[in-house]
Image: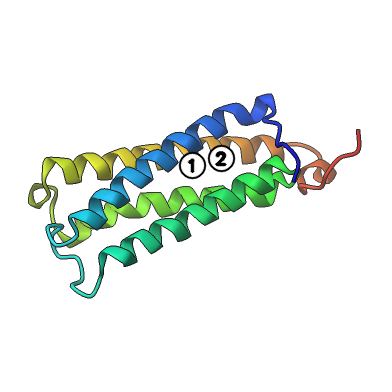
């Protein structure tokens, strides 16, 4: 496997993905380690389930980045939009219980992940809009010969 070069147009996205990945890990670790304290989570969920969910979520993000960096930007960006949207799903904690029912640490990790995911989603949508405004042959995500 060759070295992946980060092109100038990918730098902001890559940095935001790293921040979101770290924020997501922080939230999921906190969620897993304090699962019994998170209000109204299903009692059937285990610590291992939370870690498995994070691994699955992260695989989506890694696959998206690999596609973007390997010359398939449209499909990669769509996967990254999905990855970011999955991070926004952490707001579901507040469907189960109000903000006041969560500790400061719970709220902090939720807000950190959601904010980072939102920033990734904005950048992905910006990149998609930029690509979709190009002629059709270039926006399909095909590799281009140099």
Q: Residue furthest top?
A: 8
Camera-side residue: 57 or 55?
55
Occupied quadrant, residue 11: top right
What residue would you read off at disc 2?
Answer: 124
Give the numbered dot on residue 67.
none
Q: Which residue: 36% across, 46% down? A: 25
What residue would you read off at disc 1?
Answer: 121
| Residue 143 left/right relative to 107 | right
In this picture, is 96 found above or below 27?
below
In this picture, is 123 found above or below 87?
above
Q: Residue furthest bottom?
A: 44
Give the Cα separation between the discs numbered 1 and 2. 5 Å
Q: Residue furthest front?
A: 1
Secondary structure at badge 2 equals helix
Q: Which residue: 17% across, 55% down? A: 34
| Residue 64 left/right relative to 32 | right
> Residue 121, position in %: x, y?
48, 42
Q: Residue furthest right?
A: 146
For the C terminus, the quadrant is: top right
> Residue 32, position in %: x, y?
25, 57
Q: Which residue: 27% across, 40% down? A: 111
> Residue 145, position in %: x, y?
91, 38
Camera-side residue: 3 or 115?
3
* Image color mode: rainbow
Residue 114 visible to an observer of this rendering: no
Mark 1 vs 2: CB contact within 8 A:
yes
Residue 63 visible to an observer of this rendering: yes
């Amino acid at each position: 496997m060759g070295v992946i070069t980060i092109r100038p147009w990918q730098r902001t996205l890559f940095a935001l993905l790293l921040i979101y990945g770290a924020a997501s890990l922080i939230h999921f670790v906190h969620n897993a380690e304090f699962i019994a304290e998170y209000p109204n989570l299903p009692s059937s969920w285990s610590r291992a389930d939370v870690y498995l969910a994070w691994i699955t979520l992260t695989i989506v993000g890694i696959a998206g980045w690999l596609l973007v960096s390997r010359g398939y930007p449209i499909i990669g960006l769509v996967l990254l939009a999905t990855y970011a949207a999955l991070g926004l799903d952490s707001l579901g904690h507040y469907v189960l219980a109000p903000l006041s029912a969560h500790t400061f640490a719970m709220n902090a990790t939720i807000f950190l992940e959601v904010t980072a995911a939102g920033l990734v989603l904005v950048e992905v949508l910006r990149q998609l809009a930029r690509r979709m405004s190009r002629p059709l042959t270039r926006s399909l995500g095909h590799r281009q010969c140099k």
